[in-house]
Image (cartoon, coloured by chain):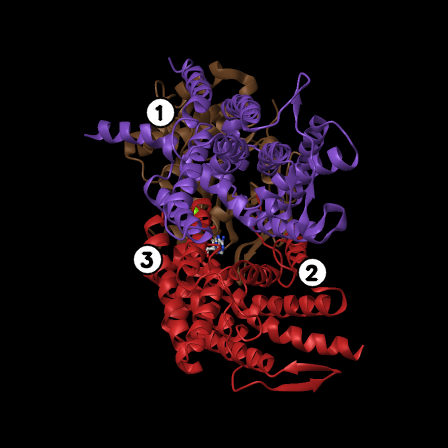
Amino acid sequence: MEQLLGYVVVGLATGSTYAVIGLGIALVYQVSGIINFAQGDFVMLGGLTYAVAAESGAHPVAAAAIALTVTAGCGAALHLFVLSPARDAGHDRLIVLTIGASILIQGLALLVFGADQHFAGSFGGEHQFQAFGISISAQYLWCAAVAAAAATAVWALLTRSQSGRAMRALAADRETARLMGIAPLRTGLIALVIAAVLAAIGGIVLAPIQPPDATAGVPLGLKGFTAAVLGGLTSPLGAIAGGLLVGVVEAVVTGLVSSGYRDAVVYGLLVAVLLVRPGGLLVAAVRERV
Amino acid sequence: MARLRPFAGYLVLAAGLLLVPAVFTRVPFYTMSTAVLMVLLAIGALGLVPLTGLARQVSIGQAAFYGIGGYTSALLSTRAGLDPWWGLLAGAALAAAVAWSLGTVIFRAQGHYLSLATLAFGLALAAVVNELPATGRNAGLSGLPPLHVFGVSLTGDLPIYWLGAGLLLIGTVAVHLLVRSQLGSALTAAGDSPVAAAAAGIDIAALRRTAFVVSAVLASVAGSGYAHWFRYVDPSMLGLLNSVQLLIIITVGGRESVWGAPLGAFTVVTLTEVVRGRLPGSGAEAELTAYGIVLVLSLLVLPRGLAGLPAALRRRAGAR
Amino acid sequence: MTHARLELNDLTVRFGGVTAIDGVSLRHDSGGVVGLLGANGAGKTTFVNVLSGIVRPAHGRARLDGYELTTLPAHRIARAGLARTFQNLRLFGSLTALEHLLTPYGARRRGRKAALALLADVGLTGTGERYPGELSYGEQRRLELARALALEPRVILLDEPLAGLPGSESDEMLDLFSRLRDSGTTLLLVEHDVPSVLRISDRVLVLDRGRLLADGPPAAVAADPGVRRAYLGDGDD
Ligand SMILES: Nc1ncnc2c1ncn2[C@@H]1O[C@H](COP(=O)(O)OP(=O)(O)O)[C@@H](O)[C@H]1O
Ligand SMILES: [Mg+2]
């Protein structure tokens, strides 16, 4: 029983990183109406770049800066060279385009970094602490703290800055926002870059716990999707709550059942939510129907 | 004239399929096993024409149905000792039932949930198959008997190729009839404007579900064919890359037309062989990169795929 | 032939904090043309959307001949005899004009001949094989109307069908509406062009920020001081 609490703590910490990944998905979906299947690959790219830079001796802060820059650049490139040229395309084509981008990023990461896992040390050295009868790496605290800071920064950006207001306006009513002179493409670019940065942050703090390789993006992206869909895809707070829930479910299943079924349970959770309440478990159901 | 066109298309396809063995055994890097792969993938991709091409619903989980076909065939033929054809039929029926149930719930809601739901469903099923003792865990199941026709068992690439080519031809005719039927125009209408289609009395949820079931059945048949050809199945059949590959095939070939499936399968398998055989240090990385580039480029430059090329050229010539 | 019976009871639609339709109640069973006036953002399109099942009300009811419009899915509402057009055209880009008229529920059964006749009725003879992209704006509007008529509806909701049409085409459309009315179909005509609405309507509704501001014969509504102050007088447009 006490151990269960320990798993919950670990789950909340990993879940906080899924929350920021999911936050990026929800943000892009809100602003541009695009389901970005490349989000998981941004996580991979951020984590892998960080780990490779750290392995080659870069200071962790420098490694993180490199990883954030690379991933943000990749997000901008996705928007400028892939999504913007297809802005008149339907949702279906945009979805397939982000899938294309996803495997392209994966392939390039394999070409550049190889297929091996890369290892980065915990922030500030290896520390373990005992809680609820299990020993927990201090890196989990870093996960929670960094994720909370990132979420707070996004919140401040959305509510305090001009681009944040533009994003919220586009999300609320696209047509009216355009009439007010808000440029959907530019705002969409900003949203996608923010999403990429959030993904990279998730990848970086997770890297010491789950050493990344070039194929790590798909499962991490799926967890972000589960988080975002649990929150209804449209609500930033919902995505955060969803991420925490995914983390807890995952940690408890791993701890109590077996790690083999961990992914199946998380994916199953996503299927179940889509089947039962596609509008999200944590928000009111969608209003428009056909 | 317009009425004769499909028959001309069938003839060209049939002639192409007939010529493949003669050509593929004589030119470098094409082999009969690449030919088998092409027809199987074309059968799997064919189902995406009504679903993705007309109804504009994206499935990223077709490999799940491919796997359902393969594993049903494997289990029924090795464990229950049933004739392989029963496995193929049972797999198709199971895939249809799964797609029907999934579609019933997913399409109740408006939105782009099919892509997410199929992705998650496919990965969940892959994870389960990877863990269950009954499906042989990650070792898979081996020792499948070959398919047989009129008492002749189909071992080796050439006989399987002829069977696959026959199934592809039948599948093409069937999907083509569907596309040109009332159901086809209703699917197109629902893809162009779901709201207007509903306002015209079309039950778009039921329609999308029908297209999804068709796609599941074709993917399952391809999976069964694959299983009895390789005589072995493992969880990699359900891998995400297989789903993505079908999506690439139909996008590159042209998702609005049945000719897109064989054209796309030929192009993508050729590309895979080129990348694998020719590029230095080639492996999954070059393949993935090439897939990504081809997918993005074809969507940006040739949104109707290779099958749409003649019409695009004609339009351009007409505009002059 | 009896006319369609529409009954609305305290119908209310909200979008977040905005109440787009605010407690509208009315009854209509005498056929003819019902004009719906209102400034931009008054809730006219939302009114059409909620009746056709695209949007769900927060509360209240709407019925057509005993069918509950507020709970039926959109395609069932269409099959129950309610058709509509869209303010921003929504044609099927990959279907020909003739296919547009064969796609609605029941149209295939009535056959190609009926579809061709319908095409002629709206003045689109000879355009059957063309795609929407190859039609003029006015032709597209008429095609959308024809698609709605292919359902053989008892009620048809027209969301600003005259917007953007030159005078001559606009008059042809109004002619078409009169013929439809005479055949027993009930028309709800959402329009900005006040004189046209007052001329053709048998009954006029005025929406103001979601509320039913006025309801009556055209002459009475035109003379209503509240309406003149809130809408007709302030030179909207
Ligand atoms: N889907 C929607 N989401 C949010 N607000 C909406 C939506 N549709 C309409 N509205 C709002 O409802 C009000 C009425 O709009 P509408 O019915 O389009 O008016 P009209 O057709 O009379 O110009 C407006 O304030 C509009 O912004
Ligand atoms: Mg309007």
Q: Which chain is brown?
A: C
| Mark before the other along the chain sequence, 3 or 2 | 3
Which element carries disc 2, helix, strand or loop?
Answer: helix
Circle number at residue C130: 1
- Residues at marks 2 and 1 touching, judged by CB atoms closer than 8 Å: no
Q: Which chain is red?
A: A
- Residues at marks 3 and 1 touching, judged by CB atoms closer than 8 Å: no
Image position of B245 with respect to C152: above or below: below
Amino acid type of disc 1?
Answer: Arg
How many angstroms separate mark 2 from mark 1 (CA)? 57 Å
Viewer-proximal residue, C149 or A51?
A51
Q: Nearer the viewer, mark 3 or mark 2?
A: 2
Amino acid type of disc 3?
Answer: Leu
User: How crowded is the residue under tag 1: few (<14 C-alpha within 10 Å), some, or many (20+)?
Assistant: some
Image position of B264 with respect to A89: above or below: above
The quadrant where residue C75 appears: top right
> Residue B137 at x, y = what percent?
70, 51
Which element carries disc 1, helix, strand or loop?
Answer: loop
Q: Nearer the viewer, mark 3 or mark 1?
A: 3
Image position of C40 with respect to B54: above or below: below
Give the quadrant of the N terminus of chain B. Answer: top left
Q: Chain B hue?
A: purple
> Residue A166 at x, y = what percent?
39, 66
Q: Pointer 2 indicates a residue of which chain?
A: A
Report the residue marked by disc 3: A80
Q: Pointer 3 indicates a residue of which chain?
A: A
Viewer-proximal residue, B22 or A140?
B22
Would residue A144 be found to the left or right of residue A150 on screen? right
Circle number at residue A260: 2
Viewer-proximal residue, A270 or A57?
A57
User: How crowded is the residue under tag 3: few (<14 C-alpha within 10 Å), some, or many (20+)?
Assistant: some
